[in-house]
Image: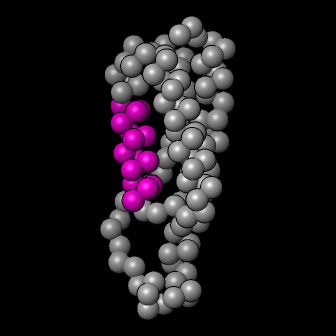
């Protein structure tokens, strides 16, 4: 991975976070896919020859999500399904937190590295 790829990936992650938040509903599958992509990026960044300063910033990023295949009883519970609503709010907060963490990184890369 080079600096240009890293920059583009941060822009991609930010766009994905925006898309999920604008949707108003983040599904478990979307969160799971985001977590897979995020973990893959972190692994590739550590194995690459990126500058250590950038690797340190990447190392501080986190996305806390554990995929659990669950049964939804939403049809039976209807609007009273508070567990699903609470989980979706938690997922939304996790995406907002990730977006907050990566928001300034594209600018940091532009200002400090040539690509």
Q: Is residue 90 visible?
A: no
Judged left or right of residue 102, residue 32 is left
Q: Residue at x 48, y 30 (%)?
A: 9
Q: How many marks overall?
A: 0
Judged left or right of residue 108, residue 64 is left
Measured as percent of width and height from the top left, residue 106 is found at 61, 25
Measured as percent of width and height from the top left, residue 93 is found at 60, 57
Q: Residue at x 45, y 83 (%)?
A: 74
| Magenta segment main secondary structure | helix
Residue 66 shown in magenta:
no
Relative to 69, residue 76 above or below: below
Question: Residue at the bottom extreme?
Answer: 76
Residue 31 shown in magenta:
yes
Q: Residue at x 64, y 35 (%)?
A: 103
Q: Residue at x 55, y 54 (%)?
A: 20
Measured as percent of width and height from the top left, residue 49 is found at 39, 13
Q: Magenta residues, as a range?
A: 29-43
Measured as percent of width and height from the top left, residue 19 is found at 57, 50
Quarter the N terminus occupies: top left
Relative to 58, residue 2 above or below: above
The quadrant holding residue 79 is bottom right
Q: Is residue 62 visible?
A: yes
The quadrant holding residue 109 is top right
Judged left or right of residue 18, residue 63 is left
């Amino acid at each position: 991975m080079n600096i240009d790829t890293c920059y583009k990936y941060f822009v991609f992650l930010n766009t994905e976070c925006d898309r999920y938040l604008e949707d108003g509903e983040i599904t478990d599958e979307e969160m799971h896919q985001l977590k897979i992509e995020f973990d893959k990026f972190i692994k590739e960044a550590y194995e690459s020859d990126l500058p250590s300063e950038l690797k340190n910033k990447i190392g501080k990023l986190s996305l806390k999500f554990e995929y659990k295949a669950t049964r939804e009883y939403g049809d039976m519970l209807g609007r009273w399904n508070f567990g699903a609503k609470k989980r979706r709010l938690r997922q939304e907060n996790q995406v907002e937190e990730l977006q907050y963490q990566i928001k300034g990184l594209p600018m940091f890369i532009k200002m400090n590295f040539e690509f």
